[in-house]
Image (cartoon, rainbow, N blue to C red):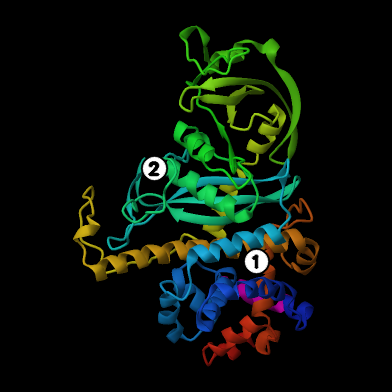
Amino acid sequence: MKLYYILIIIAKQNSIIKGVFIMISIIESVISEFRSCFSREAAFSWFSIVIFGLIIRFDHHGICSIIRWLMLDPACYDPMLRFFRASSWDSEELMSHWIRTAVSRYPLITFGGRPLLIGDGIKITKESSKMPGVKSLHQDSENSGKGEYIRGHHFGYAGILVGRPEKSFCLPLHGQIHEGVGARRHDIKIGGDPTIVTRMANLVIRTAEDTGFPCYVALDAYFSTGPAFLTFKEAVNEKGEQSVHLITRAKNNYVGYLVPENSSEKKFQEKDKVSLAKVFGFSEWFGETEVMISGNLRTVRYFTWDLFWKPVRDIIRFVFIIDGDDRYILMCSDLTLSGGQIITIYCYRPKVENMFRTLKHLIGGFCYHFWTKAFPDVGRGEKIWLCRLSETERKKFDLTLEAIERFVNLSGIALGLLQYLSLTRGSEVLEKYEGWLRTASSDCPSEGVVRSVIQAEFLSSSCKVPADRTLRMIRGRGRETSSDLAA
């Protein structure tokens, strides 16, 4: 069925493309900006090939699928695996360059001059006994198809909001494994002992620093904790401004304290305690505003109240919202934002969930299987003591974790390139697209539509004599029968 679908695409597109690879050329131009991140030409060549492979492939069976759908020689398999563990490039440097590229090339949606970062975690099932970082994870998802506990990797990811209000994406910027790596992460400095919350906060802070802008970040209720707010509060830029202000959802059992008038003292007296959930009983306090929720303009009622919050011993802006029968409370560390702005910002938070879904199912960004023989044999629930490993084993352990994170982050770059074409070349993509869309909702196509056009360009017979550097490299590493397959 897949081969039949490919042949249909090729047959339709051969009469349209006629040797012009607009989308591939644009991707090539963006990829070329990353050359400085690689100390060796060979590593940069493999980087280009992997990015194209992640976009082109029709299945998600690991590295094999890239070899298969780019029609590379099977001898390329081992060198491609070595690329993910190579010392000729640094993933932190690469992701910093990617973030700077995003800020310079993509249309950012800003609030008061601050871009909006969106962060969240995702838990991926993995069963390998030789894969580092795999542990038992409690599954918080409301999806009833998942068990309460799974074994796998817990990734934290930070993205940035791009596009325009009526059509926006969460552009993936940087991902990290946040559980099962406690002995390996030595770069956590702010917020005390590292936890999932402080690791996410530090990831967001480093991402904001790479953008060069003070930012806002929207996180879900899991991160509405004192350590999260304190970690962001301690991070200031050169101007003395807080680098990142947090907007998150409060839990219903939270309490605040009234702020005394004409006094800067932060007192927490019982008579000043306010149970946040009880505020909804005073409906006369609430005003109305229109906000964009999931692309639709909605009218909600809200009330803004600045209260002392004991976990941070400081003032937090709380926004109480009534949306039909729903009641929820938002928290914000920036006291200059209005209630309506806070609501608007938080309504973009689900974009990161859309990003995870696309990264997982369209790109296959979490379909990896990197492992190492150096990983010790341990039973479930047993702790791994890295200090008991030899220096060689510990190095292999670290390189395997590095390879996993590199694969996921390169997948994020591949997805980001699809989003870039959607936002900047949407009309051209739709003009070239030969599939059928039941509902074309906007002139900004989905990442899946963009990918299908790129696949058609790559698989067209005119690719026999490619003009683009990356296509020439791919053809140069191709199987002897690749020309027959493209004919």
Q: Amino acid at mark 2?
A: Thr
Q: Amino acid at mark 1?
A: Arg
| Residue 364 appearing in the image | no
Direction from residue 171 to residue 141 in the image, left or right = left
| Residue 397 appearing in the image | yes
Q: Is residue 396 magenta?
A: no
Q: Give whichever of 295, 210 is nearer the camera.
A: 210
Residue 430, position in %: x, y? 77, 63
Residue 409, position in %: x, y? 51, 62
For label 1, count other residues whose C-alpha is less than 10 Å away and answer few (under 14), some (14-19) or many (20+). many
Give the residues in magenta.
2-12
- Looking at the rendering, in which quadrant would you find the N terminus? bottom right
User: Which residue bears the numbered disc 2?
Assistant: 195
Residue 304, position in %: x, y? 66, 21
User: Which residue bears the numbered disc 1?
Assistant: 451
Residue appearing at x 37%, y 62% in the figure:
401
Residue appearing at x 21%, y 67% in the figure:
390
